[in-house]
Amino acid sequence: MTGDQDVKPSSLVRNSFFNVCYQLLNVIFPLVSAAYVARILLPAGMGHVAMAQNWAQYFVVLAALGIPNQGIREISKARIRGSSEVSKVFSELFFTNAFATISSCIIYFIVIKYSSFFHDDFSLYIIVGLSIVFNFINVDWFYQGYEQFDFIAVRSFIIKICSLAALLLTVHSQNDYRLYALINVAAVGCNSIWNCIHLPHYGIRLRFNGLQISKQIKPVLLLFLTAAAIQLYTLMNTTLVGLLSSESEVAYFQNSQKIVLIIITVIASISGTLLPRLSAYLEQHYIEKCTSLVNKAFQILLFLFLPMGIGLFLVSDDAIVVLYGSSFIPAINTLRVSAFLIYTLGFSNLFGTQVLLTFGKERQLFLSTLIGSIISIGLCLVLIPQSGAVGASWASVISEGVVTLLCFMFAKKITPIHLNPGFLGKTSIAVVAMTLGVIAVRHLYVQSIARLLLEVFTGIGIYILISFFVKNPTLQAMTNLVRSALGKNRSNKHSQKGE
């Protein structure tokens, strides 16, 4: 298989399904491993590793240089023009990424080698630094631009299972924190290696002639500034918690964020499949299709996010105890505050990454994230010394709210954004009913894990049932999409048998 014509883009429903699986794995693996490791390393040990990973992540951002989003967009456009153009664009981005990664590795080594701050556990910083090295062969953006979400999901599942098995077999005491960090890095590296081995399947060959690397530099640098601004108020929150409070507070903050990110990442991954498809539509000047896709995604995300934020707030105490154990009880209030991130961070991906980047509005996205980072750092400096992880969570919620609002305002100028009439009223009725049901279950005197399961399934069941009875248009639309996808799959199988 060597031509662009051989690899056809999948349907958006299929893409969304596999992207949800992929993103779910990306957050479930850290969560499951954290649930296991939390009972072994305890808050102080987990916070120690989290701080080291946090420092390394700054240099991963520098190494990536904004290429992931640029790569998705440019590969999806090049695919329309043929396989030769795809190889050309891939080579330009690959060599740009290689230069950035080598530079970042050199800077990172100099920093940890000659700064006494990192000498207390130099070997740990070497281990987490391998994640920067692996960025050299990180080409996930190619597969996302080609809409090969099924390959990404299957590959990720296999590696995550192997990594989790390695974790359970090797991490057994508080002194095994370096092994925990190494397994996390190895999972990232195996993903990248597998990606590169699979590239010839798509006819991709590195080219050295006729490249226009300078053409990629300007948009990549602007996206890098945007990514840096985003990381400034996400990574910096963890950094400031460690510097202004304690490593235990870092663990409370990070582990609360992991729970929230499961919900946000899985649901937002539905819109994550839009960037390559929107870019392809825009390349062909299908503006009405772009508008329709954005509005469908907005309404589906709102339908899913509204109950989840309230639900997580209600079950925070049981979720913390079940997942991390009694030593993490101080993280309950942190999780309650972080639950509001579902309503802020949840939509910034749609309006920012998907809409603004598709229409080439990198400057507006950068401005939004820069303002958010400034607000976040200011709030962290004020709130963390007094409230620790809870203060950092409030800083995240408020700053992300500002970013999402700005991205929404910019996106609305590009494409009309509206909701189906009656949608909010019918959704609100279902949310209220769900809330009352979960509160009722919370009064049951049963073990935390049993109560948590009852709360979750009761909330989901009531929300879906009420939405069905009030004929919520979004639930009906989602049901029709799934039926349509299943119908196409059956017809495709029948046609293949006939052939």
Image: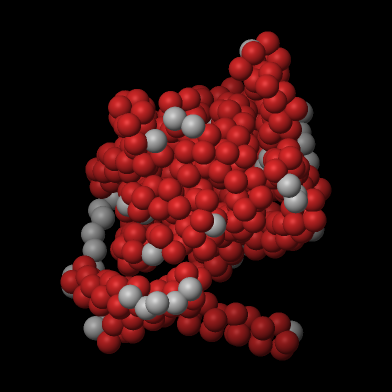
Residue that sits furthest to the top in the current view: 114
- Colour setting: secondary structure
Left or right: 157 as drawn, with respect to 440: right
For the C terminus, which image quadrant?
Answer: bottom right
As drawn, 170 above or below 219: below
Residue in front for this viewpoint, 236 or 294: 236
Identify the residue shown where x is 48% and y is 73%. Answer: 447
Identify the residue shown where x is 47% and y is 57%. Answer: 320
Residue in front for this viewpoint, 463 or 208: 463
As drawn, 99 above or below 334: above
Left or right: 205 as drawn, with respect to 303: right
Residue in front for this viewpoint, 52 or 40: 40
As drawn, 442 above or below 246: below
Q: Can residue 180 be spotted in the picture? A: yes
Identify the residue shown where x is 63% and y is 81%. Answer: 492
Q: Residue 307, percent across and down?
A: 33, 67
For the N terminus, which image quadrant?
Answer: bottom right
Quarter of image, res 452? bottom left
Number of on-image labels: 0
Identify the residue shown where x is 43% and y is 48%. Answer: 330
Q: Can residue 289 be spotted in the picture? A: no
Q: Residue 386, percent across and down?
A: 32, 31
Q: Residue 21, percent across and down?
A: 58, 63
Q: Residue 226, percent across and down?
A: 44, 31
